[in-house]
């Protein structure tokens, strides 16, 4: 079956600077994939190539099996740009009906989508009176018109409060459940936990990771942090015995690899009553993201 | 194709109404047309020309200044503004071609402009026809004025799109539009006037001048409307102009058409390369 999105060694130069560098990735129907990267990592340029606004310098990409920008590809893809501000004097319903006409979808669907994103009550108000979250939801509703095969969302949750963000991902999951592929970009890995099937990370135009979150966590091989609180006695001696580092008069911090976690915990357990508390912190998503998006910067350039 | 053009045109018309552009243009045209009609035509009661024709002559001069200005103001934001807002990306991500987008905007704006001109001038013309006693005499001249005003506006809409497509910032596009207006309807004529004054032996005024006049859309419009006034041309200081031209007065409308087609084509070629 055709992939909703496939890029094969796609590169794009601006003047002599390579902004996207040999990126190969794919998104299948019903799959949710997040694209992460700092500002300037090449995410937006990649999106513009998927939409056919920019041509790749090298390589090729297909949307639902067709070249980007062709009529068939544009019918398959739906897009939500970052920070879209609609014409302020139009109402939400007028904007939805306009895009429904361009996408040959029926008006009833446009109205239903407004209800689905929670703008049913505000549909006849001017967009100028909408809050940022409401405008973003209108943008999402617009992107859902015509049940696209590929939903392309550029930083869709930036500026949304945590509750709106949660609702946003609920809708995204529902759309993917109906068979649409979702490809979205984001700044933050933390908010993506359990929201997407795969995470792709771009750094300076290159794709440096493309895997489910659990695998990224394992690949990063970041240490687990164990913090042991000591009842009394010689803290330095305890730090030496556990192979950790004292952080204050009563606590020792140990960094250990994931597969040695149980050994360490057993060793701590053997200390008996000398230990009053144990805190085990796995590497945070932010740590994992930082690992992929910033390491080996010195080694990679050549 | 036609559905997409109509969708875009419909949205532009709605925006024109919602942004008060339609009302504002009607108000401006009605106000100025009213002033010219009722203040300017007072002393012409006895010259034996129907007042509707006299009104048309006054309004022709008004159109040269106001219609291009209104058209440019409608047009300058149309591409640069949509890039600013991010809506151009949205529209172009839809299965709609760039030609359909530009043609739709043009259609919508022409309708906005037509409403403004027909209502604005129609009010003055209607009042004159109702009060002057010679009824609808001169109605043909008046209709010709309204139609060519719309054609003049359409040409400047296309010029405005070109300006809007050339720059990415709305502010720059606005400045460019005002500059174009200044050159097209003020500075160009001043230049021609200066050349006429400097022209000692009259060779310039006989050979090059009519062509230069016809080359400017505003002057072509004025030339056509004043030269075809018939008897009333005597009132405008343009008497005998039709005989002095090396071409038929109707031919200058070709200049307007060429401007319209050329500017729209250039705007489309530039717009095709715009990265939203």
Image (cartoon, rainbow, N blue to C red):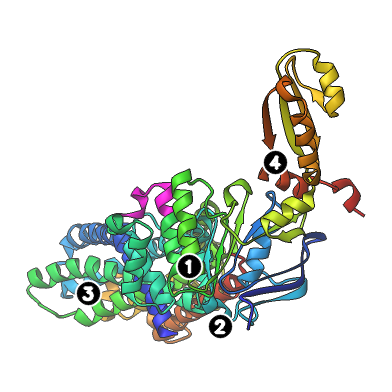
State the SS at label 4: loop
Residue A163 visible in the shown view: yes
Q: Which residue is mark 2?
A: A72
Numbered disc 4: what chain?
A
Magenta range is A125-135
Given residues B269 and A72, the one toward you in this image is A72
Q: Is residue A67 magenta?
A: no
Numbered disc 2: what chain?
A
Q: Which residue is mark 3?
A: B53
Label 4 with label 3: CB-CB less than 8 Å = no
Q: Which label is found at residue A175?
A: 1
Q: Which residue is mark 4?
A: A282
- Alpha-carbon span between mark 1 and mark 3: 65 Å
Given residues A172 and B45, the one toward you in this image is A172
Q: Relative to A273, is A182 on the left or the right?
A: left
Label 2 CA crowd tier, 10 Å (few <14, some 14–19, many 20+): some
Taken as a whole, is the magenta stretch helix, strand or loop?
helix
Which residue corresponds to the image point at 16% horizontal and 61% vertical from the top-left?
B42
Label 4 CA crowd tier, 10 Å (few <14, some 14–19, many 20+): some
Foreground mark, 2 or 3, reads 2
Which residue corresponds to the image point at 48% horizontal and 72% vertical from the top-left?
A178
| Image coordinates for residue A100, horizontal then vertical, percent | 39, 73
Q: Relative to A90, is A239 on the left or the right?
A: right
- Alpha-carbon span between mark 2 and mark 1: 20 Å
Q: Which residue lies most toward the right here?
A: A302
């Amino acid at each position: 079956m055709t992939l909703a999105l496939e890029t094969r060694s796609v590169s794009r130069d601006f003047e002599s600077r390579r902004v996207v560098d040999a990126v190969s990735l794919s998104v299948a129907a019903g799959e949710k994939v997040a694209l992460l990267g700092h500002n300037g990592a090449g995410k937006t340029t990649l999106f513009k190539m998927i939409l056919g606004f920019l041509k790749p310098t090298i390589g090729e990409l297909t949307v639902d099996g067709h070249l980007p920008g062709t009529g068939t590809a544009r019918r398959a893809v739906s897009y939500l740009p970052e920070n879209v501000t609609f014409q302020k004097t139009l109402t939400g319903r007028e904007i939805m009906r306009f895009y429904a006409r361009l996408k040959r979808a029926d008006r009833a669907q446009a109205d239903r989508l407004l209800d689905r994103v929670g703008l049913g009550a505000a549909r006849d108000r001017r967009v100028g009176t909408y809050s940022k979250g409401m405008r973003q939801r209108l943008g999402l509703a617009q992107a859902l018109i015509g049940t696209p095969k590929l939903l392309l969302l550029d930083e869709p949750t930036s500026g949304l409060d945590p509750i709106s963000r949660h609702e946003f991902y609920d809708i995204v999951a529902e759309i993917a459940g109906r068979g649409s592929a979702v490809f979205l970009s984001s700044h933050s890995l933390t908010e993506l936990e359990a929201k997407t099937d795969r995470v792709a990370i771009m750094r300076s135009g290159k794709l440096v990771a493309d895997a489910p979150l659990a695998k990224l966590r394992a690949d990063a091989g970041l240490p687990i942090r164990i913090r042991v609180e000591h009842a009394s006695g010689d803290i330095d001696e305890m730090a030496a015995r556990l192979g950790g580092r004292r952080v204050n008069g009563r606590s020792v911090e140990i960094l250990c690899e994931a597969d040695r976690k149980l050994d360490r915990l057993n060793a701590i357990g053997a200390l008996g009553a000398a230990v009053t508390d144990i805190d085990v912190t796995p590497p945070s998503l932010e740590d994992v993201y930082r690992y992929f998006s910033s390491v080996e910067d010195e080694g990679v350039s050549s | 194709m036609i559905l997409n053009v109509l969708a875009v045109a419909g949205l532009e018309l709605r925006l024109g109404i919602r942004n008060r552009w339609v009302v504002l243009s009607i108000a401006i045209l009605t106000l100025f047309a009213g002033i010219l009609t009722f203040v300017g035509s007072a002393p012409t009661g006895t010259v034996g020309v129907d007042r509707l024709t006299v009104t048309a002559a006054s309004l022709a001069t008004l159109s040269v200044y106001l219609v291009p200005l209104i058209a440019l103001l409608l047009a300058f934001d149309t591409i640069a503004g949509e890039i600013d807002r991010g809506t151009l990306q949205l529209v172009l991500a839809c299965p709609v071609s760039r030609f359909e987008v530009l043609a739709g905007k043009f259609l919508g704006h022409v309708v906005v402009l037509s409403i403004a001109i027909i209502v604005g001038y129609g009010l003055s013309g209607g009042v004159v026809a109702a009060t002057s006693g010679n009824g609808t005499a001169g109605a043909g001249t008046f209709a010709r004025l309204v139609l060519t005003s719309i054609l003049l506006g359409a040409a400047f809409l296309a010029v405005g799109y070109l300006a809007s497509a050339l720059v990415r910032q709305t502010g720059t596009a606005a400045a460019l539009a005002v500059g174009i207006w200044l050159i097209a309807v003020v500075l160009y004529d001043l230049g021609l006037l200066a050349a006429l004054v400097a022209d000692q032996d009259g060779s310039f005024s006989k050979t090059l001048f009519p062509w230069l006049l016809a080359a400017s859309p505003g002057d072509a419009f004025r030339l056509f409307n004043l030269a075809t006034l018939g008897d009333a041309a005597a009132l405008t200081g343009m008497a005998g102009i039709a005989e002095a031209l090396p071409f038929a007065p109707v031919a200058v409308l070709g200049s307007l058409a060429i401007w319209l087609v050329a500017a729209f084509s250039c705007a489309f070629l530039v717009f095709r390369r715009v990265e939203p």
